[in-house]
């Protein structure tokens, strides 16, 4: 393999790894506050992309993205209020079944609203054929948008959870729900906020990656699997680790097509997920209590 081809694979792997990381961050936000593993997270990504594509036919691209994110955030709040809030001490299995059911429901609704056509937003800067050449490696300007958005999301989230009153309240609910209630924190509102934030981040990710990966009614399923793999690999609840784990998975997938058919690329992530679940369920950077369901 030539050096030029090596770095081209590396750039592609980092790009897709960052996409997986953004989805994993959505998993982590909800898990950090509720202990819930939301398997409908991929559908938030799909809804953001599909809604933005539709709105872009009536308004400028930046406005379409903002409105799409707000609409998806409202859907995230609705999902929590209607399907999650009324539950009392749900088991892990029950929550998994509910969120998988929500994923299927949202996907079927999207099929009826948008049909099976593949859609995409225009490139934010440049076109699909324009690229930046660095040392013989061609990089799409949209890749820089993906990297930039992920970086901003991680920085803002770290600041939010560490330095703001609302973020500390969400962390308090994660550590001990009853103690947080005794301190006057509305645990229910914190859970709703976690779904809103997760849906908003997923929607923004769907908009940013849409020009590269395209989007259709069932595109969220694959992203949810990859995002969940990355969240487990990095350790549930750790957003910084999710970025490292996402890049690792993306690079492994990218170089895997050098030694095996492209059709087996998705099998690699599933294999990694199974290995991690068997060998180290807490992930590479997570605590060993990560899979114990927090008190809901």
Image (cartoon, rainbow, N blue to C red):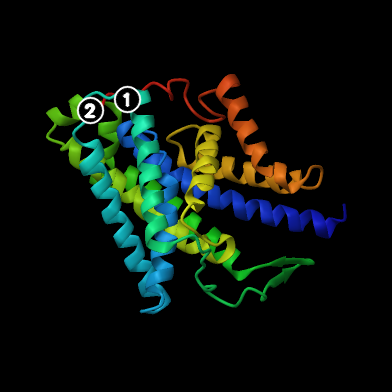
- Say which of 93 and 256 sits in front: 93
Residue 37 as seen in the image, left or right of residue 5 = left
* Residue 188 percent location from the top left of the image: 19, 38
- The reply to whether discs 1 and 2 touch (Cβ–Cβ < 8 Å) is yes
Question: Is residue 205 placed above or below 228 in the rendered structure?
Answer: below
Task: Judge by depth and name the residue closer to the eye, 64 or 101.
Answer: 101
Rendered position, 5 above or below 239: below
Could you tell me which residue is drawn at 52 percent across and 40 percent down? 225
Look at mark 2 in the image and give the residue it sits on.
177
As rendered, which of 215 and 147 lies closer to the eye?
215
Q: Residue at x 55, y 76 (%)?
A: 125
Q: Which structural element holds mark 2?
A: helix
Outermost residue, right side: 2
Spatial CA distance of label 1 from label 2 is 9 Å
Task: Classify mark 1: helix, strand or loop.
Answer: loop
Q: Position of residue 195 (x, y in %)?
A: 30, 45
Neighbours of disc 2 within 10 Å: few (<14), some (14-19), many (20+):
many
**Which residue is depicted at the point 67% across and 37% down?**
268
Quarter placement of the C terminus: top left
Q: For residue 276, which quarter of the picture? A: top right
| Numbered label attached to residue 294 | 1
Relative placement, left or right, of 209 versus 136 is left
Where residue 196 sits: x, y (%)? Answer: 29, 50
- Residue at screen point 57% across, 29% down: 284
């Amino acid at each position: 393999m030539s050096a030029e081809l090596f770095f081209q694979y590396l750039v592609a792997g980092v790009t897709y790894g960052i996409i997986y990381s953004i989805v994993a961050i959505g998993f982590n936000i909800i898990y950090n506050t509720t202990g819930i593993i939301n398997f409908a997270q991929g559908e938030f990504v799909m809804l953001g992309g599909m809604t933005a594509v539709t709105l872009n036919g009536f308004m400028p691209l930046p406005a379409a993205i903002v409105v799409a994110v707000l609409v998806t955030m409202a859907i995230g709040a609705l999902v929590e209020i209607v399907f999650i809030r009324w539950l009392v001490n749900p088991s892990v299995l029950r929550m998994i079944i509910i969120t998988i059911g929500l994923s299927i429901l949202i996907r079927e609704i999207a099929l009826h609203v948008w049909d099976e056509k593949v859609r995409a937003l225009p490139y934010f800067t440049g076109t699909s054929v324009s690229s930046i050449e660095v040392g013989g490696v061609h990089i799409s300007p949209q890749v820089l948008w993906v990297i930039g958005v992920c970086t901003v999301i991680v920085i803002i989230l770290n600041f939010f959870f560490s330095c703001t009153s609302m973020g500390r309240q969400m962390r308090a609910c994660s550590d001990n729900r009853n103690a947080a209630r005794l301190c006057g924190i509305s645990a229910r509102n914190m859970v709703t906020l976690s779904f809103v934030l997760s849906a908003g981040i997923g929607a923004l990710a769907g908009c940013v990656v849409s020009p590269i990966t395209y989007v259709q009614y069932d595109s969220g399923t694959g992203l949810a699997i990859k995002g969940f793999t990355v969240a487990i690999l990095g350790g549930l609840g750790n957003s910084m680790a999710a970025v490292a784990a996402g890049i690792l998975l993306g690079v492994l997938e990218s170089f895997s097509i050098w030694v095996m058919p492209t059709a087996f690329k998705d099998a690699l992530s599933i294999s990694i997920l199974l290995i991690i679940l068997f060998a180290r369920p807490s992930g590479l950077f997570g605590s060993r209590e990560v899979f114990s369901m927090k008190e809901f």
